[in-house]
Image: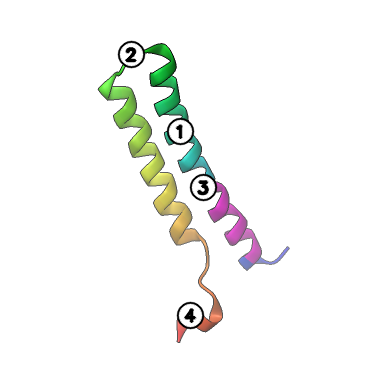
Amino acid sequence: MRHRDRRKEIGKALVDIGKYSFTAGIIGSIITEKWSPAVIAMCAVISIIAFIIGFYTIPQNKEDKL
């Protein structure tokens, strides 16, 4: 597997981790019926960090670099 393909797959995985952690935090809060601001804030921060790292890890297309 080429380096570019690895970066693309890692980036996609990090974006997915961001989505899943946010979803798990929200659904977990709904199921337990406890709206803990600390837990929701922590899930949001983890999601945002994972999404940003994943977004910048995915390489641009060669046509987009012009």
Q: Label 1 vs label 2: CA separation?
A: 15 Å
Amino acid carrying mark 3 in the image: Leu
Q: Tell me the SS state at disc 3.
A: helix
User: In whole angstroms, how far apart are the C-alphas of marks 3 and 2?
Assistant: 27 Å
Lower sequence index among marks 1 and 2? 1
Q: Residue at x 52, y 62 (%)?
A: 58
* Mark 2 vs mark 4, CA separation in Å: 45 Å
Whole-percent x, y for residue 65 in the image: 46, 81
Residue 9 painted magenta: yes
Q: The residue under label 2 is which amino acid type? A: Lys
**Quadrant of the frame with the C terminus:** bottom left
Q: Nearer the viewer, mark 1 or mark 3?
A: 1
Q: Tell me the residue that label 1 is attached to.
A: 23
Answer with mark 3 or mark 2, whichever residue precedes in sequence.
Answer: 3
- Whether pointer 4 and pointer 3 mark residues with C-beta atoms closer than 8 Å, the reply is no
Image quadrant occupied by the N terminus = bottom right
Q: Nearer the viewer, mark 2 or mark 4?
A: 2
Residue 59 against residue 43 in the figure, above or below: below
The magenta span reads 5-14
* On screen, residue 46 above or below 34: below
Q: Is residue 10 left or right of residue 26?
A: right
Residue tagged by mark 2? 34
